[in-house]
Image: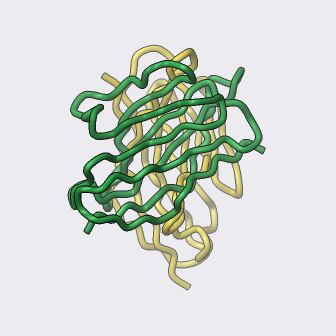
Amino acid sequence: GNSVTQMEGPVTLSEEAFLTINCTYTATGYPSLFWYVQYPGEGLQLLLKATKADDKGSNKGFEATYRKETTSFHLEKGSVQVSDSAVYFCALSYSGGYQKVTFGIGTKLQVIP
Amino acid sequence: GAVVSQHPSRVICKSGTSVKIECRSLDFQATTMFWYRQFPKQSLMLMATSNEGSKATYEQGVEKDKFLINHASLTLSTLTVTSAHPEDSSFYICSATPWGNSYEQYFGPGTRLTVT
């Protein structure tokens, strides 16, 4: 079956530090890959996505590249802010009539001033 | 665009009672809606998938008679937790897939259910 593995948190960084959250996946075929963010007490928001190999998703300074050869989709940001503190979920799904999303466990990011 | 709302955002109910949670797609028609449950410090667990006008498809281990799902229209799905118990306390999140866009799921803000 499909699975998503991401590093467990919490990850604690100082403001303006470089962020990497690792994500690898196991899946057949060519899934789409996503990063979602969940701020405290809120639902999930799509942060970025990539639908095919070598695509780079980017949004709000965050980036992730779909690496099929390493089955990875690591999330990066060059300079984090306190407002980036949240839980980040890596996920995959397939297009088609039944788009079940498989989520990773989530990585909590804490950015301190 | 692509906003999904949930109501209520928080609900407290007594053990043995039933509670209904609504999920609405505000500015698009949703072919499919999903219901997830999130335990503290854990990922989302898919409970069921519903398509408008048809019965929901439940994931293994989810009691369909306890978690009733009604997908009455292309913009509304409801989850009813029947005979709630304290172990049903959780964060419930719905999502919806727009008609014609099979990649995206848009998530609601979630409903915090506390059963006392």
x and y, in percent, of residue B10 in the image: 47, 65
Residue reaching furthest front?
Answer: B17
x and y, in percent, of residue B17 in the image: 30, 56
Vertical comparison of B12 with A51: above or below:
below
- State whether residue B102 appears in this view: yes
**For residue A109, side relative to residue B95 (left or right):** left
Q: Which residue appears at 42% of the width and 72% of the height?
A: A12
**For residue B109, side relative to residue B29 (left or right):** left
- Quadrant showing the C terminus of chain A: bottom right
x and y, in percent, of residue B14 in the image: 28, 65
Please tell me which residue lies in front, B21 or A54. Answer: B21
Q: Which residue appears at 64% of the width and 46% of the height?
A: B4
x and y, in percent, of residue A55 in the image: 65, 30
Vertical comparison of A37 with B29: above or below:
below
Check the image and tell me how it is coloured: by chain
Q: Quadrant of residue B89?
A: bottom left
Q: How many marks?
A: 0
Vertical comparison of A53 with A9: above or below:
above
Q: Which chain is green?
A: B
**For residue A104, side relative to residue A17 (left or right):** left
Q: Which residue appears at 60% of the width and 37% of the height?
A: B76
Residue reaching furthest bottom?
Answer: A113
- State whether residue A4 appears in this view: no
Q: Which chain is yellow?
A: A
- Quadrant showing the N terminus of chain A: top left
Please tell me which residue lies in front, A32 or B10. Answer: B10
